[in-house]
Image (spheres, grey):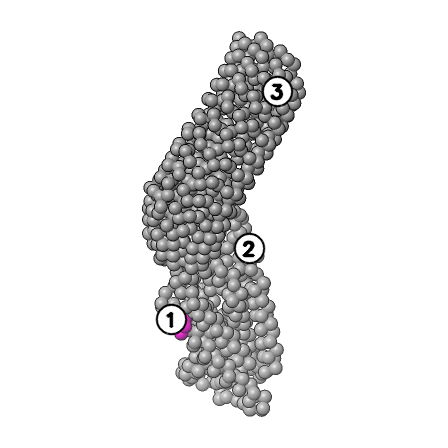
Amino acid sequence: MLEILALNDNNIESLPSGIFTYLHQLQSLYLHGNRLKMIQSNLFNGLTKLVRLNLANNTIESLQTGVFRDLQQMKELYLHGNKLKVIQVDLFSALLNLKNMKLGDNMIESLPSDVFRYLPQLKKLWLYGNKLEEIQIDLFNSSTKLEKLFLHDNFIDSLPSGVFRNLHQLQELYLHDNNCTVIQVELFHGLSKLKKLSLNNNSIESLPSGVFNLSSLSYLSLQFNMFKTLPSALFKDLVSLEELRLDGNRLTEMPIDIFHQFNGMTLEVLTLRSNKIARLFPYQFSNLTALTFLDLKDNHLEQIHSKSLYGLTKLKFINLRKNSLTKITKDSFIGLALQNDSYITLADPAMCCFLEPSNRSQCVPQNKKSPYLTCKQLLPSAAVKCCTWIFGFCALFANIVVFIWGCQQIKSESQGEKYVKQIVFITNLALADLIMGLYLLLIASVDQYYHEYFPSYAKHWRRSMFCKLIGFLSVLSSEASLLLLTLIAVDRVWGFRKNLIRHKLFGQKTQIILSTFTWVIALALSIVTVIFNDDQLYQFSDVCIGLPLARSKIYASNYTNFTISYDFDIPDDHFWLQRFTEIGSKAGNYFSIGIFLGLNFLLCLIIAMCYILLFIYICKSGFALMKTDLKMSIKMGAITLTDLMCWLPIIIVGILAQTGVKELSPEWFPLITTFALPINSVLNPFLYSTVDQVSKHFVHRLRPNCYTEETTL
């Protein structure tokens, strides 16, 4: 005999009366997914052994009283996904053994208070997705065995006290996605076995203390309501609570003792994301000794006070992304004991620096980690800080002296006095080196300002206009200096070659024109560094100069499921971690490589070749040379040597990094940018005077016929 009949997912529009009359042994009848609009009142007559009837996902608009009169053995009835508007009071009067009934996703606007009185065995009732605006206080009086009740996705704006008073066996109650604004203090009283309660996506503004007198409750969702604050004693009776969800409200802070009022030995999951929480109190979570999952994402937290996370000894995952955290220090995570399988997510990789060194590998930042990140201050040690200040002052004031002296010499020459060769170049070189001294002092000042807080401000600092201004000065100084030294080298070679056949050096006007052209080029290159945003040029550089000392790539983000999974009812609440895949280089990186590795390498090569030729001219020429020319050439050669000492290490390290041969440890980057880069700017003004003594000694060792006494050009 036929026991199961499946006619589901067809295009059946109607069924004639008596079609099932002789199927006396039928137990399961599946008619869901058709186009049935009406059910004949005697359609199921004779199906006395039917225990399961599925009429879901049709277009049924009404059901006549008596349609289920022979279905006394029915245990499961599915009517969801139809267009039912009205339920007759006696419609289910014959279903004395019914245990599960789905009436969800219909158009029911109200239910008679006695509609469920003939369903004493009912355990699961689905009324979600209708148009219910109110619930009669006596609606569930006879449903004493009800275990699960689904009332979500309706238009319920209030629930009378006592509506659930007889539901002593109720374990799960879903009231989310309604219009509730007020919850009566006695609404849930008597629900001693309730384990799961969902009130999210309502319009509740406040809750009275004592409303959750639910000793068996393990899951409570209050997400996406309108709470601005919560009573300190709100959760004091929730002695079995394991998961508390408070996301998407308007909470500005949690009362300091709100988690001290109940037994925190059971709470494992606490989510507070998308609120307006601006601060956490010390020892706020200290009572939550069993907590494994804490979500504080997307709040207004600017700092984490010392010991705010104290006592979280079993925490496996904490999410602090999308906050305004800028005032984090090493004291912020005191008392946070991360286990080997624990993780903490933060927006900026620099924030991971304030964790204990043993826990930093368990920090998962939202953004990719910079290879320049060392978890130290802007200038990493006292020695570097001290040297930066000294170098900055030396470069600034010594070059000011040389610049003033050069201006006086130019003025004297214009008045017909003795002309100092290459004085225009020397004066402009002093100006370029002076700017480098200013750059060093600004970097040292910023380091002093941020001090130990710098890692938490690093991202904001790199994006600031002040950082771009400092970067502008560093590029302007370094490129102008290198271009001027190239001109000096070419000028000396050209001058010596012409002097050998009695020609003169470049005159003052020519030097002025060439110097002006040099500053135009350096200025143009510097302006480009301001046009590029920080993610293109300064993405890795805290000292605001985009030296290509590490490979810079574009990263495409993708998400992988977090290894710690929780069985949340709402799929959107699963956590995913952002990973990065390298897909290509940025335009800013190409610019940095082209300037600092391409152009500067070419200029250094020209300088080296010029002075090799100059040395050859001096030692092998059979012509008489002026003593002053020889001294000046030795002096400028020493100055140029310091410039090569500055740029060659940077160029070599950059080429090795960009070709993937070898990348230096990030700890070396501040040393390179604060020591190697400005070395020539610091030494040049001193070389103007000290090299004279060396050059005199070298001149006297040459053959007497290698030079003659100085003559006026």
Within 10 Å of disc 3 (Cα), the crowding (few <14, some 14-19, many 20+) is: some
Q: Secondary structure at mark 1?
A: helix
Instruction: List x then y, in percent, for residue 546.
Output: 50, 62
In the rendered structure, are the residues bearing label 1 and label 2 in contact, judged by CB atoms less than 8 Å apart?
Answer: no
N-terminal of the pair, mark 3 or mark 1, is: 3
Q: Residue at x 56, y 11 (%)?
A: 46
Task: Report the mark closest to the observer, 1 or 2.
Answer: 1
Q: Is residue 129 left or right of residue 357?
A: right
Q: Which mark is residue 586?
A: 2
The three-letter code of the residue at mark 2 reads Lys
Instruction: List x then y, in percent, for residue 487.
Output: 55, 74
Region rendered in magenta: 386-390
Q: Which mark is residue 386?
A: 1
Q: Residue at x 50, y 15 (%)?
A: 73
The three-letter code of the residue at mark 3 reads Gln
N-terminal of the pair, mark 1 or mark 2, is: 1
Label 2 and label 3: CA atoms lie apart by 70 Å
Q: Is residue 83 left or right of residue 402?
A: right
Task: Report the mark closest to the observer, 3 or 1.
Answer: 3
Q: Secondary structure at mark 3?
A: loop
Instruction: List x then y, in percent, for residue 344.
Output: 41, 48
Answer whether residue 422 is visible to the viewer in this image.
Answer: no
Label 3 and label 1: CA atoms lie apart by 92 Å
Label 1 and label 2: CA atoms lie apart by 35 Å
Residue pointed to by mark 3: 64
Is 326 colored magenta in this rendering? no
In the rendered structure, are the residues bearing label 3 and label 1 in contact, judged by CB atoms less than 8 Å apart?
Answer: no
Q: Is residue 600 left or right of residue 237?
A: right
